[in-house]
Image (spheres, rainbow, N blue to C red):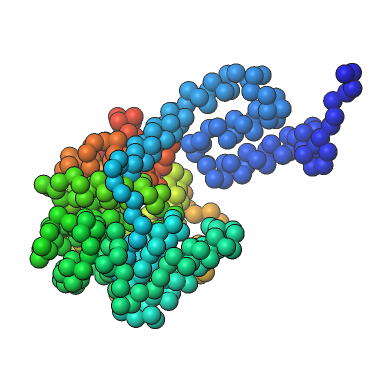
Amino acid sequence: SNKPPRRARGLGGWANRWPLKSLVANRARKQIAAKDPLGHYPAAPAIVTLWEKHGGNALQAPDLIDGIIASDTARNLLRVFRLQERLKANGKQTGAAPARHVHVVGAGVMGGDIAAWCALKGMTVTLQDQDMARIAPAVQRAAALYARRLKDPRLARAAFDRLIPDPAGSGVPLADVVIEAISEQPEAKRALYRSLEPRMKPGALLATNTSSLSLETLRAGLADPARLIGIHFFNPVAKMPLVEVVHADGDAGDALARACAFVGQIDKLALPVKSAPGFLVNAVLAPYMLQAMRSVDEGIAPETVDAAMVAFGMPMGPLELADTVGLDIARAAGEELAGGAEPPRCLAERLARGNLGKKSGKGFYTWRDGKPVKPGGAAPAAAPAGLAQRLIQPLVDATRQRLEAGVVADADLADAGVIFGTGFAPFTGGPLHYQRSNPWHSSKTAHAE
């Protein structure tokens, strides 16, 4: 046919015409630069250029495409994809019978949200706490989760019906997996296990969501100590993809394999870790957050510290993260891992005033409607030279120490755990890969600053 090509109608058609095309491209570049000021992800601006100069025809810009494919970012993101596939494979244990019924003890933020997630993934879930008043908030959060995730009201209702409040603990004998998610008090946990163990059906998995306590401490008093394994979720449960599956030296592989299979069944990434203070993720986050707080003690504003790390590629700054976790929890984790060292002054002062972070409405930031209020108007003050590297170094060092201590099996799993458990800048390929790729980025360099 000799008909002329049809022009696209509407805004799309106008956007493809010069000079409007150039204006749209420049605006897109500004939006990309605002989210990625240091240009860690070159594909996005390159795609804008491809559209602006060549109408999106990649065949007309082979050098541009080759530059994207050959970039360090592309190679590292492919590495992250392979790491993710390896973690997924941990959850595909052959021969493990799928869990159909999960019983969760503890309806607080973590326990309630773990229960809601398991019901979302198709399991019958009984949720136990001292009374219905303690369970009700978890049920309300679950209803909101299902409404967001499952657009069809019938599916949302079905998920909601699978989550059963159970203050009497009637679900224990029926459960394939029993998850303890009560407060971090060893004796309270051990007493609970002693009451649960004789009521559980043979072969059922007993799991703790402890974030820091060793399995060896918690297993004391169990008739079958190896039955207890750690299944450590991260907050918020619905958004964080990683689950640390905690085992102890000398454990047979059966409980670990079944726990990993359960984690895979609920569409999370299973990372086997050995029982040690803080396991992997919390052990590397604590020194990173403490270093950020020491920077505040030195007079650097919290928003400047956080802006430096967001520019580096972290999903949020370390002080906003500390506020989100809770400053009391951050202090407890720091004390356990720092061997009794004095907490940073800025942390001690806030805790003395009762400022615990997001949950109290004030910490390093004031929180409104679940979001930190940051100073408006002018951008944060320029970060001192080398601040981001100085902050990230303790995290890298701690990751290396965890690897050398055998907490994770190899460097790739260490990188995978830190990426998917902390959001560590994916374009780097993980903290240990980042250190290997930047020989100058060493402890000696950091300590010399």
Residue 306 visible to an observer of this rendering: no
- In percent of the image, x 57 and y 23: which residue is there? 65
- In percent of the image, x 59 and y 63: which residue is there? 153
Q: Is residue 239 left or right of residue 44?
A: left
Q: Is residue 78 above or below residue 156?
A: above
On the image, the x and y values in percent for residue 169 come to: 29, 73
The answer to which image quadrant residue 62 occupies is top right
On the image, the x and y values in percent for residue 221 come to: 10, 66
- In percent of the image, x 71 and y 27: which residue is there? 55
Q: Is residue 52 left or right of residue 312?
A: right
Residue farthest along the right direction in this orientation:
3
Q: Quadrant of the C terminus?
A: top left
The answer to which image quadrant residue 27 occupies is top right
Front in this rendered view, residue 218 or 443: 218
Q: Is residue 193 left or right of residue 382?
A: left
User: How many tags in the picture?
Assistant: 0
On the image, the x and y values in percent for residue 368 come to: 51, 70
- In percent of the image, x 29 and y 59: which residue is there? 177
Front in this rendered view, residue 295 or 161: 161
The answer to which image quadrant residue 107 occupies is bottom left
Q: Is residue 321 above or below residue 268?
A: below
